[in-house]
Image (cartoon, helix red, strand yellow):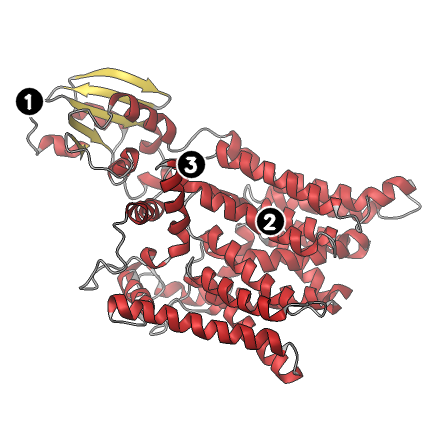
Amino acid sequence: MKDSSPRVATWTLLGLVVFIVAYFFFTHEGLYDYDDYHYARLAHELAAGTFQVNPDAEHLLIEPFRERLLVFAPVALFYRLFGVGIYTTTLWPLLCTVGTLVLCWALYRRRAPLVAAGAMVLLGLHYFMLTLSNYLYPDNILMFWALASASALLYGRRESQQHPRRWGISFALLTLAAFLAKETLVFYLPFYGGVLMVDLFRRQHKPFWLASLGAGLLLLLGYLSFYYLYTGDALYRLHRIEVANVYFQPKNYLGAQHGQLLARLTWQPLASFLGAGLGVALLLALVAAVSPARRLPEARFWLWLAVSAIACYWWGSTSLEQYNPITLTPRMMTPLLPPLCLAAGFGLREALQHRLYAGWLAMGLLACALLLHNSGAVVYAGASVCFAGMFFLHHPERVSPLLFSRLPLMTLLLLAAVLAIRPLYFMAKPSAFSFFEQQALIRQYLPDTAQGTVYVDEHLLEKVDFYYGFSPVPTLVYRRYESADSLPLATEKPAWMLVNRSTLTNPELTRQLIKYTEPEVLARFPHRKLVAQKGKVSLYQVFL
């Protein structure tokens, strides 16, 4: 199968979609934290007709979630069509994850199938992108709309484009859609401005930019007018972000971490990229930058967008009033992934066709593996072996003509297998939250018709109304375990205790939220009777 065949990209896309959907179901943990619960609640408000643009007249709230309409509005539609549930809550991020791969496929399945296949493999098997496919977080949603925006800019300015004005308007609409998903779309704006300046200097693509700037101005005026009408503040969203920066100051680089600022601005971002598994894509993008691929206009487009976005991530600020870099967590890197992986796709094509680049990649990836000294090093070591094999075998005199012609695709398949190691490991692991077992017990033994008091952990307490479709259950009161010592209990009504051993032993929760163990909980309720158990979740009736 040659690079000129679109089947390379199509079969890659199909295989990755199957893998992503399997990952979605095998690793689903229900609601993860406050963020996805809050977005789900906003979706329910929108579906129920109780949503308010500004419920905080005194500006006391600091969360920026309500302004990210493209995160929860589609979920509200799913709630209206299918009801409130964990799969209707997380279907939207799954669709955006798959949609991002579809955009890569649509851009290059005919022009450069190996580029499309490589970009999709690097993006679709990136572990932290996969982890966000089954949580209602804005990051993969932003990733889809940001790539759609950048693709409209690229496609609308192609020399063969017959409808530049339509694509100019589409570019403006898609850029606004990305901003309505998450504010970190601003990582792309310096590059967009640079492309505009270059086109103005060269006097190119005038119809595209006239349509784009005209539509963008109208959309911006409409957006600002909307917030002025409902809040009296045209810059309401910006001001909310600034308030959030002040509120979270103890946790950011302006507060307790101010001593880490120099490291944050120098070596820490690169270390975070390597730790997140982006070293493969970074090295392949570097190959694209130093190889003949850099002379291709579309390779340069994605390279410069990746460089610009990484620079904003590395040195940019989350505030206009004070300098505060963004936190170095993998999910904050998702806007960087599409341009980086597409640029890496061009580099991968060069490496698969020229053994010298494969040799340098093998050494670079081996260095990454030696630097990490953890389980993530397995991926770098495996990728290094793939390119080392390509380097030694990519010689017509050493292998048969048939094997030689298939060697690039074989290397691509091996690279995909290496990148899939970490996702497959987590697909095989037991649940860390036991959400579905907990949900089954609540539905069977604690329905909305039940009465009494239920003692639970804090992780469940702050999200318990989700299990009832966000509808209040006045006859059933949920309380913390500790409240049994201080709050009176109606003796004529039953009392229950739900113990989820997964959450009680989950390191992500026990570091801050949960400060007790299962034996301590059981000791608090010595008079109890086991009612039901599913996996690591037990329901007791307690007698106080």
SS class, disc 2: helix
**Are discs 1 and 3 less than 8 Å apart at CB?**
no
The residue lying toward the viewer, choosing from 147 and 387, is 147
SS class, disc 1: loop
Above/below status of 340 relative to 47: below
Left or right of 316 on screen, residue 409:
right
Q: Image point 62% across, 68% down: which residue?
A: 304
Rounded to the nearest angstrom, the CA distance separating label 2 from label 1 is 57 Å
Check disc 3 and report the residue beneath it.
Answer: 87
Q: In the image, which is nearer the foreground, mark 1 or mark 3?
A: 3
Check disc 1 and report the residue beneath it.
Answer: 491
- The amino acid type, in three-letter code, at marker 1 is Thr
Q: Image point 54% across, 72% down: which residue?
A: 212
Which comes before the other along the chain, label 2 or label 1? 2
List the single residue furthest toward the right.
Answer: 397
Q: Percent from the top left, x then y, of residue 389?
A: 78, 44
SS class, disc 3: helix
- Residue 101 image label: 2
